[in-house]
Image (spheres, rainbow, N blue to C red):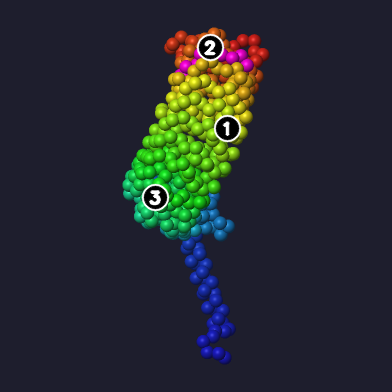
């Protein structure tokens, strides 16, 4: 016999004791989970009412309770308590017992107070958006966290110096967070998305960004500095660059090295000045939406523009110093669906080919007080049938309306505050969609300007009037 080994009845007894201990630990762990749920339930202000089915005496199968998901072994992995009307504060007790919890959602409730730091260590997704939470983000969050969502709350700064090292997505938009984004956040190799728009952040540009970042949403803050410093290098993985409505200044350089992956570029609402360099339009072919409205840019729109082939939305609106005529022969991409040129200082007439060959659904030319002359029948003829909204409000358009409208999907057309004359009724063609709204100052008493006054559908015997 070898020394130190067990055999016979002794070995069997040892094996049975070990098995019993394992079963006891597992059973204790499973028993702790419903107790933890009850502790969490009672921690909410109205938890006993909202989570009434969390009751062992009524239903011992806690995996069937509202919002609870488990593995086949009975380990709780998900709590989805979205939109249940929970009130009070987020409980700080009970979470540590849910050792297998990976996803927790308390979104769209009425929760107050601060965010606790006692969530399970293995948590991967935490959703707290659309409540009334206040204070700052906790300095300590689960190390395993991949996705953190706390948007639409009342959070304030400062932001924590460190975040969980594997965090990939951060949603903190529409809060009151001030201060700056810590520089250490740029050294997070797993980070893919920063959505911090509509806060009170005061970072200076250029700023360092995570190397694999795909979406940067910082619109509606107090970000300041040069819009495109020559030393600023964008991550080559970037798809969305959303910097609208900040305090960024300077001129747009002739050439910008945008990532080839870029789909959304929002720069409007900043005091950018200077003219529009032709080189600006050397944009990646992947670009889908480009917003450059409400700036201090001046001069005319360059006629020779190489548009990205996939562009669907283009916004130059509310550039009060943008002057000159709309380019004739403007080769807009066939994919374009929305074009906003309202609120500028454009002059001349509407080119007969504006929008031709596109997929326009919305066209805004409103509030260009020197954009005038008659509406060309050739232009009306060239408008794509996909058009749903046409805004010509507050210009200097004259003459009578053409009769050759062929816009079967038109919903709304604004014509008020021009100098149009002639008939007050407009035929919209074979309108198979909602009844077209036509606004025309010359057709209505002053008090009714802006209301629906006439819709004529091809073949209809009568028209409705408000």
Name the residue nearer the viewer: 55 or 456: 456
Residue found at the very far bottom of the displayed protein? 1
Q: Is residue 244 visible?
A: yes
Q: Is residue 459 left or right of residue 69?
A: right
Q: Position of residue 125 (x, y in %)?
A: 48, 52
Element at badge 3? loop
Magenta stretch prevailing secondary structure: loop
Give the mark nearer the N terminus: 1 vs 2. 1
**Label at residue 207:** 3
Residue 300 highlighted magenta (yes or no): no
Which one is earlier in the sequence, the residue at label 3 or at label 2?
3
Residue 157 visible (yes or no): no
Residue at image mark 1: 332
Q: Which residue is identified by label 2?
A: 399
| Part of the protein shown in magenta | 393-404
Q: Residue 440: horizontal and vertical position, in percent?
A: 50, 14
Relative to 31, 176 lies left or right = left
Q: Looking at the rendered structure, which numbered label has been put on residue 428?
A: none
At horizontal 57% and vertical 42% (from top left) the residue drawn is: 285
Q: Within 10 angstroms of label 3, few (less than 14), some, or many (20 or more) residues?
A: some
Mark 1 / mark 3, whichever is N-terminal: 3
Residue at the image position 40 percent from the left and 39 percent from the top: 251
Label 2 CA crowd tier, 10 Å (few <14, some 14–19, many 20+): some
How many neighbours does mark 1 have within 10 angstroms: few (below 14), some (14-19), or many (20 or more)?
Answer: many
Secondary structure category for the residue under label 1: loop
**Nearest the camera: 282 or 437?**
282
């Amino acid at each position: 016999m070898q020394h130190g080994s067990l055999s016979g009845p002794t070995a069997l007894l040892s094996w049975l004791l070990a098995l019993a201990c394992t079963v006891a630990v597992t059973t204790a762990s499973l028993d702790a989970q419903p107790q933890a749920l009850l502790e969490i339930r009672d921690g909410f202000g109205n938890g006993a009412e909202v989570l009434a089915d969390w009751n062992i005496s009524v239903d011992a199968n806690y995996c069937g309770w509202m919002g609870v998901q488990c593995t086949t072994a009975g380990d709780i992995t998900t709590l989805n308590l979205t939109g249940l009307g929970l009130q009070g504060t987020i409980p700080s007790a009970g979470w540590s017992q849910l050792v297998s919890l990976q996803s927790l959602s308390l979104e769209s409730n009425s929760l107050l107070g601060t965010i606790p730091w006692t969530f399970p260590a293995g948590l991967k997704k935490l959703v707290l958006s659309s409540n009334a939470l206040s204070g700052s983000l906790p300095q300590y969050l689960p190390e395993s966290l991949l996705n953190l969502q706390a948007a639409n709350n009342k959070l304030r700064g400062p932001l924590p110096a460190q975040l969980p090292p594997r965090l990939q997505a951060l949603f903190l938009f529409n809060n009151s967070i001030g201060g700056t984004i810590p520089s250490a956040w740029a050294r997070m190799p797993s980070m893919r998305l920063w959505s911090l728009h509509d806060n009170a952040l005061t970072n200076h540009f250029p700023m360092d960004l995570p190397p694999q970042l795909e979406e940067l949403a910082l619109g509606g803050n107090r970000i300041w500095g040069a819009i495109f410093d020559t030393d600023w290098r964008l991550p080559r993985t970037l798809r969305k660059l959303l910097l609208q409505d900040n305090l960024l200044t300077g001129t747009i350089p002739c050439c910008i090295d945008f990532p080839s992956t870029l789909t959304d570029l929002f720069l409007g609402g900043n005091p950018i000045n200077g003219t529009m360099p032709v080189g600006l339009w050397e944009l990646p072919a992947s670009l889908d939406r480009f917003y450059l409205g409400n700036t201090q840019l001046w001069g005319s729109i360059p006629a020779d523009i190489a548009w990205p082939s996939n562009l669907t939305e283009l916004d130059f609106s509310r550039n009060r110093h943008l002057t000159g005529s709309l380019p004739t022969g403007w080769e807009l991409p066939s994919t374009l669906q929305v074009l906003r040129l309202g609120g500028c200082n454009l002059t001349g007439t509407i080119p007969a080919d504006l929008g031709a060959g596109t997929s326009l659904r919305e066209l805004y030319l409103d509030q260009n007080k020197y954009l005038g002359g008659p509406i060309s029948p050739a232009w009306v003829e060239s408008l794509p049938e996909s058009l749903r909204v046409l805004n010509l409000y507050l210009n200097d358009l004259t003459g009578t309306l053409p009769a050759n409208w062929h816009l079967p999907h038109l919903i709304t057309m604004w014509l008020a505050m021009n100098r149009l004359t002639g008939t007050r009724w407009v035929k919209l063609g074979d309108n198979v969609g909602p009844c077209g709204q036509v606004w025309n100052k010359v057709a209505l008493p002053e008090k009714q300007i802006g209301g629906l006054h006439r819709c004529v559908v091809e073949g209809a015997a009568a028209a409705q009037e408000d």
